[in-house]
């Protein structure tokens, strides 16, 4: 029996990613899951310093050798972190924010990942809901929703909320994109299919609040390819409305 699991260390403390902690978390997960091995463990957005700590990746190598992990990878905030992580030969996956509003990963990181046969998991594919087309200037969010309390990075990386895009700016860009959605498609399907047009992407991981949303999202994988013209128009929206807000940060 094998599975995948997640536990979090303090994302601000690099020295927490040590042998004692990592081994303890893996062993606890194996016990809780009643599993003999974890298929894929990913370090979730550790501090940048961790990518310059080969001893951390050595611990993960040892856990693979011990049969407790089958594979491991990382989840990153920045393209630079992704490129550094891939220098470790046993990193198998990189999870990174990639969507219509965060296009920088496709420029350098994607080609390098393909050369090294690294799996890419595109996270935050709908930009915290902006790319669903359902949010408006009057949308309200609960107090514990990061879309209410982290718009400017008050609690964690700003890029995790609306992909770092100013809310009003994002809404305006969504209206431009809405005209590009093919008849019979939902806007989330369009946004997800755009991601899947990139050969380097292994999968994307949208959230869903109910079974209907999950089914709608899953259908995106079976939709026809977007035309070259549609891809160019999406890029034009990014260049004119979004790029200056996010491109050089992540």
Image: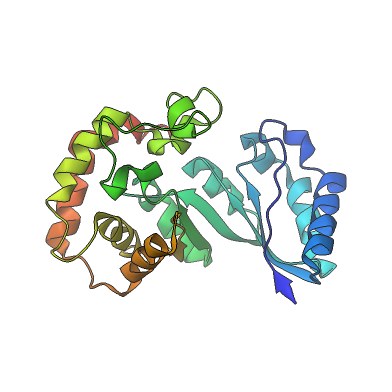
Camera-nearest residue between 235 and 140: 140
Q: Nearer the viewer, residue 140 or 221?
A: 140
Rendered-image quadrant of the C terminus:
top left
Q: Percent x, y for residue 91? A: 63, 59
Q: Nearer the viewer, residue 55 or 142?
A: 142
Question: From the image, which quarter does the N terminus lie in?
Answer: bottom right
Residue 182: x and y in percent read 15, 62
Name which quarter of the figure residue 159 lies in.
top left
- Would you say 232 lies left or right of 129 here? left
- The image quadrant of residue 197 is bottom left
- Residue at point 23% right, 73% down? 224
- Count of picture labels: 0
Name which residue lies at 66% across and 49% down: 43
With respect to residue 99, does 91 lie above or below?
Answer: below
Q: Position of residue 247 (x, y in %)?
A: 35, 36
In the rendered image, residue 77, in percent from the top left (x then y), is placed at 52, 40
Residue 51 in which image quadrant: top right
Colour treatment of the image: rainbow
| Figure check: 127 above or below 120 | above
Residue drawn 43% across the image and 64% down it:
211
Residue positioned 73% across, 42% down in the render: 53
Q: Is residue 49 left or right of residue 147?
A: right
């Amino acid at each position: 029996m094998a599975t995948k699991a997640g536990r979090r260390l303090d994302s601000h403390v690099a020295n927490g990613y040590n042998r004692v902690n990592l081994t303890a978390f893996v062993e606890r997960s194996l016990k809780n899951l009643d599993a003999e091995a974890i298929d894929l463990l990913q370090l979730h957005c550790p501090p940048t310093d961790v990518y310059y700590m080969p001893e951390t990746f050595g611990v993960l190598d040892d856990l693979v050798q011990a049969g407790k992990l089958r594979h491991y990878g990382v989840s990153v905030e920045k393209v630079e972190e992704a490129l550094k992580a891939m220098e470790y030969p046993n990193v198998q996956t990189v999870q990174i924010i990639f969507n219509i509003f965060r296009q920088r990963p496709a420029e350098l990181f994607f080609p390098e990942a393909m050369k090294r046969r690294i799996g890419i998991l595109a996270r935050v594919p709908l930009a915290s809901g902006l790319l669903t087309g359902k949010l408006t200037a009057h949308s309200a969010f609960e107090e514990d929703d990061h879309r209410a309390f982290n718009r400017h990075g008050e609690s964690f990386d700003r890029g995790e909320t609306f992909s770092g895009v100013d809310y009003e700016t994002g809404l305006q860009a969504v209206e431009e994109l809405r005209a590009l959605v093919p008849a019979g498609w939902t806007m989330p399907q369009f946004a997800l299919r755009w991601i899947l047009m990139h050969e380097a992407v292994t999968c994307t991981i949208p959230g869903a609040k109910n079974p209907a949303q999950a089914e709608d999202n899953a259908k995106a994988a079976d939709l026809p390819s977007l035309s070259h013209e549609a891809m160019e128009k999406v890029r034009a929206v990014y260049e004119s409305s979004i790029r200056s807000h996010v491109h050089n940060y992540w």
